[in-house]
Image (spheres, rainbow, N blue to C red):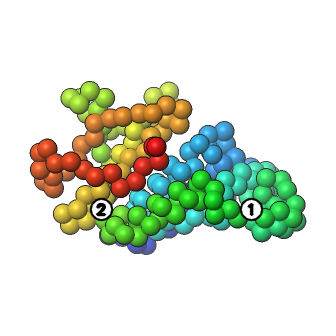
Amino acid sequence: HVWFRNRVVTLFDDHDQVRKGPNKARFCAGPDGPSGLVNVLALNALTMGIPCIYYGSEQYFDGHGPSDQFIRECMFGGEFGAFQSHHRHFFNEESHAYQQLATILELRRKKFALRRGRQYLREISGNGIDFGLPRMLGGQIRSVVPWSRIFNDQEILLAINTDYASPRSAWVTIDDGLHQVGRTLTCLYSTSP
């Protein structure tokens, strides 16, 4: 925990992508990319490590193609712009992802446990009795994926719904040494209306 939290930079989009060989693609180039972007931004910002957001990710840039150029789009009106454009400006502080990321990063700034806390994947249950870690079914996880960040005696429970088409709910385990039975947790952030 000590080493990872403040020495490892975490990211999901970048300008090299050497692991993909000749085919380069940003996260939003995939069919579920735009639907999952806020989840991915939240995971990047609220899990252990130093979050790094590659420019344009918060603007839904969807570059893809056979060379690095396709994932190095101009944001401010260049010759090779985002979304296969030319000379257009794409920095939009009103975009949904940008607004959500700003809220998430402000929460991270205010809550020390989100920056420096230990991290634990939490078990879930659909019936409140049988608990287990989220797992893949048919090559996908379409579920609630919860984790905790704990610093000293403060636990912050986080969860994302990986099923973009349907709302999900679950019972989630928390540290019983830090919480009294019957205590209510306060929701600090949600994308649900």
Residue displayed at 75% across by 65% down: 75
Image position, residue 86 (x, y; %): 87, 60
Given the current orientation, which residue lies at the most extreme bottom position? 7
Q: Amino acid at mark 2?
A: Arg
- Asked whether residue 57 appears in the rendered view, the answer is no
Q: Which mark is residue 118?
A: 2
Residue 31 is left or right of residue 155, and the answer is right
Which comes before the other along the chain, label 1 or label 2?
Answer: 1
Kind of residue indicated by mark 1? Phe
User: In the rendering, which numbered label is found on residue 90?
Assistant: 1
Q: CA distance from mark 1 to mark 2?
A: 37 Å
Q: Nearer the viewer, residue 120 or 87?
A: 87
Residue in the foreground of this view, choosing between 96 and 115: 96
Residue 83 pos. (x, y %): 79, 53
Give the image quarter of residue 17.
bottom right
Task: Give the secondary structure at mark 1.
Answer: loop
Q: In the image, is residue 84 above or below residue 74? A: above
Q: Quadrant where the N terminus lies?
A: bottom left
Q: Where residue 121 sits in the image (x, y, percent)? A: 33, 48
Where is 159 relative to 80, above or below? above
Alpha-carbon neighbours of circle 1 within 10 Å: few (<14), some, or many (≥20)?
some
